[in-house]
Image (cartoon, rainbow, N blue to C red):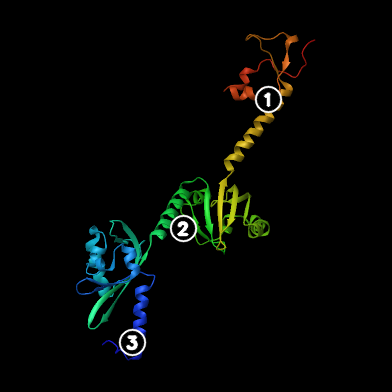
Amino acid sequence: MSPEPTSPDYGADAFLARLAIEGPAPILAAEAATGTVVAVNEAATELFGRNRSSLIGMHQTELHPPETETRHQEGFQAVQDGREKHVRADAEEPVTILRADGSTVPVDVRSTTFTHAGTEYVLGIFQDASERMENLARLEQQAAAMDLTTSGIALLDGDGEYTYLNDAHVTMFGYDDAEELLGGTWRQIYADDVIERIEAEVLPVVEETGSWDGELVGVKRDGTPITQRVSLAQLPDGGITCVNLDLTEQERRLRRLEETRSLAEELGRYWLAFEKDEEYLEASEVRFLSPMQVERKFNDTQHGLDDFTNCGESEPEP
């Protein structure tokens, strides 16, 4: 029974009705028995790209793309049965609406039923989810890119616990699945002395400047040390993003290069090379090769020593 014009509730009902009509959230009401739209507010006309007169009288399934008619009929019935109240645009079966120009818009929908003057209605409150879905798609693309990169990437919360690790970060430390590290802290991949250094020297810099970059030695799952280039950046929520680059192979190559250079220097000091028109030089034409020339000789041939002949420590005859 509706309140009388002179009752205390009458003014409140009129105010709420006006609020619904002019409110920012798109609202539609449809008869539960028929699914026919009987009331819409201004925000709904903007969302659907239709005026009020064209929306009123439409069947609720006409508000959505034709290929989703059956699913929305079932959803409408679920609301009547009290089985469904809120459907998000990023749900497994998202909700999209059909605008007058034929375009579609992803929406979040909150629905409920109410009875007025003996008639049951389904009330739907819509929210345009386009921007959120675009951001979500962008994040998914970024996550896909992070999973493909060879650099390890991890996100940590304010307590230092992992909330995300890409595949490279997981395999870099010898783990099979991110779940083995998620929920744990960064301390599980460092030795005690490195943990002390990070807490005393690294994290204070991150807190003060917002970032830190340097080398750290971590520990793989099997206990093997791993040297990494680590870049840390503080997030607005107090967490940290961490990018790790495995330097183990680089260190191995640097050691090999250093060994080659040391050998070249040794050869340059003690070896004599005789060559002229592919024949041995006379003793008076002997010359020493510099370390760089010796190293180049090694790099230019698969059999470095074959290019050097008649080598010894004695000085050439005058």
| Pointer 1 residue | 292
| Pointer 2 residue | 179
In this picture, residue 195 sits left or right of residue 145? right
Task: For the N terminus, give its image quadrant.
Answer: bottom left
Q: Are marks 1 and 2 in contact (CB under 8 Å)?
A: no
Q: Amino acid at mark 3?
A: Tyr
- Residue 194, compared with residue 14, is above or below; it is above
Q: What is the x, y in percent for residue 159?
A: 57, 64
| Pointer 3 residue | 10
**Mark 3 vs mark 1, CA separation in Å:** 98 Å
Q: What is the x, y in percent for residue 296?
A: 63, 24
Task: For the C terminus, give its image quadrant.
Answer: top right
Q: What is the x, y in percent for residue 265?
A: 71, 27
* Residue 81 in view: no
Q: Which residue is outermost to the left?
A: 34
Considering only order in the chain, which callout, 2 or 1, is on the residue closer to the N terminus?
A: 2
Q: Of residues 18 and 140, which is closer to you in this image?
A: 18
At a point 59% along the width and 55% down the height, the residue shown is 233
Pointer 3: residues within 10 angstroms few (<14), some, or many (20+)?
Answer: some
Q: Amino acid at mark 1?
A: Met
